[in-house]
Image (tube, helix red, strand yellow):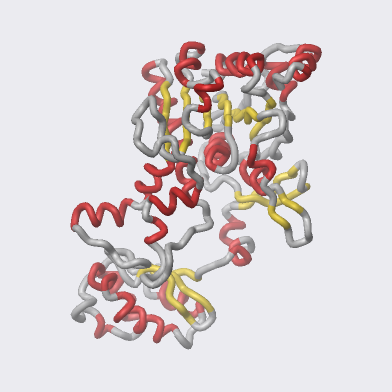
């Protein structure tokens, strides 16, 4: 457990008292530590003096501003210190923080932390209880090396190599890239999960460990239904179809698309009743979910979309729900940000961003009965917490901090 210093959060939040040193950049690193910070962990972004690379990525807003989207959306509830890990004094400062921390989190290329002198082999000697979470494209050499280990990877690489780009769309389309950046986000979420698993193991053993979270592994695991179907049955499902169920996905109505989720024969029977086509129950080629999936484009979609053609999304959804068939409209961001259900669930948090002013961001999707609501703090400016962390926690004076900065350590 981290030693309690003035910078340690206090309260009933689940991870209060847990300190995380995050050598993170772009999205794959920051998303998972945001989850830990939302649960009350003290997450310290350890940044080079110029800030981590994700800070320079901007998007032009509708009113002409350049919006630094990643810090605003992924760094709430965190603190920032500047430590130059290419400077020996900076390395020693980092090691001092490791002594009073629980987790080191990094998403550098494999081997970079070792070359800087702050890899797991070094840090576990300083703090045997440290949990060292590494996120990368293809894994770490000290745990389970593979031939792709040294390759660089961004989100699109993980989506493409995992087969997920062939899961959506139709057979005549090229592979589809999902701009939800799943291959960055999912491994980062799994990194947060794995950090908590390692913490639980440390409760029993007193020892930390190196946790290896690879993008490729995790995205293949996310594509488990298609891959397991091929492994177990030798079957490749058609693109855009769910092997076990149909109709399952978006179907065109008069004013847009409705998502149907007809899973299982009871719901199929209710669906047939809802559209007035009880004759489809037991029809050859539509006898079970797998048959319907295989005949989705040739037989089933024309029937469903023919019935929907003169009906609005709202009419279709109302009728489906009335018959106990899961359904919902396909929504774009303009629909989502005004959704009354999301508003009631406090999905969006207002953060007073130091660059953008007051903005709304997606908040913590996890609701807990015994944990109090978390009032988010703004994302930090580069080095904003140098005095709090390096001064108060490590006991360095203002003069010492100034001298370290002059020598290139901060």
Residue 227 at what x, y percent from top left? 29, 53
Residue 105 in sight in this render: yes
Q: From the viewer's perspective, is residue 385 above or below residue 93? A: below
The quarter holding residue 166 reads bottom left
Q: From the viewer's perspective, is residue 264 above or below residue 97? A: below
Residue 269 in sight in this render: no
Q: In this view, does 271 lie to the left or right of 52?
A: left
Residue 162 at what x, y percent from top left? 38, 51
Give the quadrant of the C terminus: top right
Q: Residue at x 76, y 19 (%)?
A: 405
Q: Residue at x 37, y 49 (%)?
A: 222
Residue 106 at what x, y percent from top left? 53, 31
Front-most of residues 2 and 123 = 123
How many labels, in total?
0
Q: Residue at x 61, y 19 (%)?
A: 94
Q: From the viewer's perspective, is residue 253 above or below residue 129? A: below
Q: Which residue is drawn at 47% across and 11% down?
A: 125
Residue 102 at what x, y percent from top left? 52, 22
Front-most of residues 56 and 199 = 56
């Amino acid at each position: 457990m981290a030693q309690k210093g003035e910078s340690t959060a206090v309260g009933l939040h689940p991870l209060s008292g847990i300190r995380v040193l995050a050598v993170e950049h772009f999205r794959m690193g920051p998303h998972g530590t945001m989850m830990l910070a939302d649960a009350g962990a003290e997450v310290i972004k350890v940044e080079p003096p110029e800030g981590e690379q994700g800070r320079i990525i901007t998007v032009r807003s509708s009113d002409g501003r350049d919006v630094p989207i990643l810090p605003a959306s992924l760094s709430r509830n965190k603190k920032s210190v500047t430590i130059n890990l290419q400077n020996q004094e900076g390395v020693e400062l980092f090691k001092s923080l490791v002594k009073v921390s629980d987790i080191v989190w990094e998403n550098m290329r494999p081997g970079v932390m070792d070359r800087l002198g702050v890899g797991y082999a070094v840090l576990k000697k300083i703090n045997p209880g440290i949990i060292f979470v590494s996120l990368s494209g293809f894994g770490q050499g000290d745990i389970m090396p593979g031939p792709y280990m040294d390759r660089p990877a961004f989100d699109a690489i993980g989506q493409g190599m995992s087969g997920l780009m062939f899961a959506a769309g139709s057979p005549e389309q090229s592979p589809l890239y999902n701009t939800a950046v799943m291959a960055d986000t999912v491994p980062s979420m799994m990194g947060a999960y794995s950090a908590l698993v390692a913490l639980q193991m440390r409760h029993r053993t007193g020892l930390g460990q190196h946790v290896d979270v690879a993008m490729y592994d995790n995205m293949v695991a996310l594509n488990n239904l298609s891959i397991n179907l091929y492994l177990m049955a030798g079957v490749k499902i058609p693109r855009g179809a769910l092997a076990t169920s149909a109709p399952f996905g978006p179907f065109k109505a008069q004013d847009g698309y409705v998502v149907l989720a007809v899973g299982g024969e009871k719901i199929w029977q209710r669906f047939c009743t809802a559209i007035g086509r009880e004759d489809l129950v037991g029809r050859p080629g539509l006898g079970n979910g797998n048959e319907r999936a295989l005949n989705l484009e040739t037989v089933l979609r024309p029937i469903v979309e023919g019935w929907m053609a003169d009906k609005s999304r709202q009419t279709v959804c109302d009728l489906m729900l009335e018959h106990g068939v899961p359904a919902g409209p396909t929504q774009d961001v303009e629909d989502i940000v005004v959704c009354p259900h999301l508003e009631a669930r406090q999905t969006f948090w207002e953060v007073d961003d130091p660059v953008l002013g007051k903005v709304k961001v997606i908040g913590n999707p996890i609701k807990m009965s015994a944990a109090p609501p978390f009032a988010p703090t703004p994302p930090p400016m580069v080095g904003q917490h140098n005095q709090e962390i390096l001064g108060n926690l490590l006991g360095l004076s203002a003069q010492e901090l100034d001298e370290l900065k002059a020598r290139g350590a901060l």
